[in-house]
Image (spheres, rainbow, N blue to C red):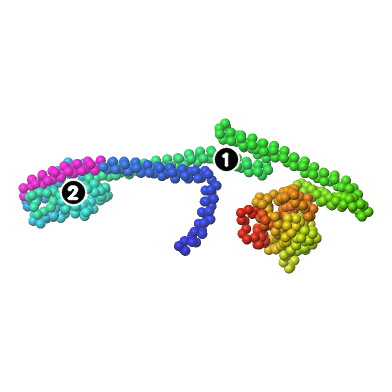
């Protein structure tokens, strides 16, 4: 078996290629299955016909030969009994005359022979040999046949033998010739019937059936290939057209030929494509108008917001001179204006992503510094709600080609959300890297995520619990913008959560700008969770 392994390894690519072609070609499968089934059916049917024809042909020849043999056996007994003296000097001529008479009554090519085994008849010099003596019948009359005749039985068999005129097929019958005058000796009679004609006809029948069967199987294969091609070709055209449509070539259509079912399919496909094109164009126009409206409104609000901000700053700076109610109103106005400005900034950023104008300003940056800066800025907010921020990072600098402003915004959103939903429990920020990627996880032990919410958490303005108060402000667009920032880097932003078990967000970025990710240095499911992916958990593998 070990010796076969190199050969198996060499054949493995070819086997995989054949398997791939087999799975991808419906026409090949249909033709192959048709050929196999038709070959089995035609082969079995042809074998039955050939066997039946051959058996019938040879049986007829055998019945005719047996009839002649039995008649000859009777006459041989009569004529051998009529010889007056077995010890006569003319016994050889008399036996030759008997054989000539028996052979003359049969078909052309018939050979009749006798064989003697004598103990007392001294006048038979050829005892133990065949008569006539000019024939060598040792190939035609086998030892089994002779033993059967010596035992007093008679029978037949088919043999191929050369009696001086080339190899021919013979039907050989043998029988003893009982006579009282030949006491002490045994006389054996053999009939050799040539059956070359019957064998040749049987061979021709088999050849004809084989040729017709092969031709029929090939014809069925060709017909199946043509029919399958006529059926599969429109499907292939529809698949190619659908691929072009999915690639954005919305003007692609199928060619409609005739009025059959395939033409109906092509016409229905074209109608579907036209409807999809109209809907996509309409949605694109609506999306364009929506993006333009968002951008225009955001820009237009800048001017009045600046005026309101100046007035609010003035009121906020003079709040100590107001009565308590007015002072509180000035503080609320200042806080809401800060949130409003953040919302406008996020809307402008979203509009740039939607318009495709967002640019990545990558530079070598120490991520440890970025992470520490984020945690230090959010430390006061975390202390106010009783959340302890923990940072786990390697000692040496972690250098990666990133846009520090965008990465810092991603981390600020992730850590801020962890503080909001941490239920007063510690929040851990972990940093790790390998040769191709750098990863940052933010782990909280708060309410967690329900199944399916990991797919919604990155949607715009989505909140798991609308009644929950925010500690860090927030506009509902933070995670959406973070997702776009991660994609702009060619990275991943993923979420995991378990109800009551907290949540973990993982940011994975390539070390070099433009690099492709194959994995992450940190697991998505936290190590402190007992069994990942249990019932009721949720994970976004490639958000």
Q: Quadrant of residue 195?
A: top left
Farthest residue, direction right: 321
* Image location (x, y in percent) of residue 351: 78, 47
- Of 499 and 436, nearer the camera is 499
In which quadrant is the N terminus drawn?
A: bottom left
Q: Label 1 crowding class (10 Å Cα cut-off): few <14, some 14-19, many 20+?
A: some
Left/right of residue 302 with respect to residue 428 in the rendered view: right
Q: Position of residue 224 (x, y in %)?
A: 48, 40
Q: What mark, if any, has residue 505 been given in the picture?
A: none
Residue lying at 23% horizontally and 41% vertically, measured from the top left: 63
Residue at 22% across, 45% down: 193
Picture coordinates of residue 74 (x, y %)? 14, 44
Q: Is residue 41 left or right of residue 262?
A: left
Mark closest to the chain's N terminus, 2 or 1? 2
Q: Magenta residues: mostly which secondary structure?
A: helix
What residue did someone put label 1 on? 235
Q: Distance between the Cα atoms at labels 2 and 1?
A: 72 Å
Give whichever of 442, 68 is nearer the camera.
442
Q: Which residue is mark 2?
A: 154
Q: Which residues are magenta?
A: 60-85
Q: Position of residue 18 (x, y in %)?
A: 52, 51
Q: Report the side of 327 relative to 130 (left or right).
A: right
Residue in the image at 54% along x and 45% along y: 25
Name the residue furthest top.
Answer: 259
């Amino acid at each position: 078996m070990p010796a076969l392994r190199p050969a198996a390894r060499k054949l493995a690519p070819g086997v995989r290629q054949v398997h791939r072609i087999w799975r991808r070609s419906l026409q090949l499968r249909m033709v192959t299955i048709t050929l196999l089934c038709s070959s089995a059916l035609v082969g079995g049917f042809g074998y039955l016909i050939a066997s039946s024809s051959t058996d019938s042909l040879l049986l007829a020849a055998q019945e005719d030969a047996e009839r002649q043999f039995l008649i000859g056996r009777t006459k041989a007994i009569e004529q051998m009994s009529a010889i007056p003296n077995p010890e006569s000097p003319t016994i050889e001529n008399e036996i030759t005359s008997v054989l000539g008479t028996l052979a003359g009554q049969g078909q052309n090519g018939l050979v009749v022979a006798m064989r003697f085994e004598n103990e007392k008849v001294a006048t038979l010099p050829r005892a133990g040999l065949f008569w006539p003596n000019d024939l060598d019948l040792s190939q035609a009359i086998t030892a089994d046949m002779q033993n059967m005749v010596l035992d007093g039985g008679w029978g037949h068999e088919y043999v191929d033998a050369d009696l001086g005129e080339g190899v021919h097929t013979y039907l050989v019958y043998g029988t003893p010739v009982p006579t009282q005058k030949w006491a002490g000796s045994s006389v054996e009679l053999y009939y050799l019937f040539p059956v070359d004609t019957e064998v040749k006809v049987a061979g021709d029948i088999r050849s004809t059936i084989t040729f017709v069967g092969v031709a029929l199987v090939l014809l069925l294969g060709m017909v199946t290939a043509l029919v399958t091609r006529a059926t599969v070709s429109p499907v292939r055209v529809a698949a190619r057209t659908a691929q072009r449509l999915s690639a954005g070539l919305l003007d692609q259509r199928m060619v409609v030929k005739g009025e059959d079912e395939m033409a109906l399919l092509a016409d229905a496909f074209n109608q579907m494509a036209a409807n999809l094109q109209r809907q996509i164009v309409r949605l694109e126009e609506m999306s364009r108008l929506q993006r333009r409206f968002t951008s225009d409104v955001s820009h237009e609000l800048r001017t009045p917001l600046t005026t309101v901000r100046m007035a609010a700053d003035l009121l906020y700076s003079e709040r100590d001179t107001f009565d308590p109610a007015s002072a509180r109103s000035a503080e609320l106005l200042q806080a809401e204006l800060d949130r409003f400005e953040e919302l406008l900034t996020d809307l402008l950023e979203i509009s740039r992503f939607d318009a495709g104008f967002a640019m990545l300003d990558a530079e070598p940056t120490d991520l440890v510094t970025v992470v520490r800066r984020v945690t230090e800025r959010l430390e006061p907010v975390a202390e106010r709600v009783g959340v302890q921020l923990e940072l786990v990072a390697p000692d040496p600098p972690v250098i990666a080609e990133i846009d520090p402003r965008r990465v810092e915004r991603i981390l600020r959103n992730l850590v801020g959300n962890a503080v909001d939903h941490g239920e007063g429990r510690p929040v851990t920020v972990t940093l790790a890297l390998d040769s191709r990627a750098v990863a940052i996880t933010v782990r909280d032990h708060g309410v967690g995520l329900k199944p399916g919410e990991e797919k919604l958490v990155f949607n715009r303005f989505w909140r798991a619990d609308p009644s929950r108060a925010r500690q860090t402000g927030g506009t509902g667009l933070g995670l959406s913008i973070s997702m776009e920032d991660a994609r702009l880097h060619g990275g991943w932003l993923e979420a995991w959560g378990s109800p009551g078990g907290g949540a973990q967000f993982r940011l994975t970025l390539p070390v070099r700008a433009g690099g492709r990710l194959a994995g992450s240095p940190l697991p998505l499911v936290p190590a402190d969770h007992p069994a990942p992916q249990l019932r009721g958990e949720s994970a976004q593998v490639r958000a």
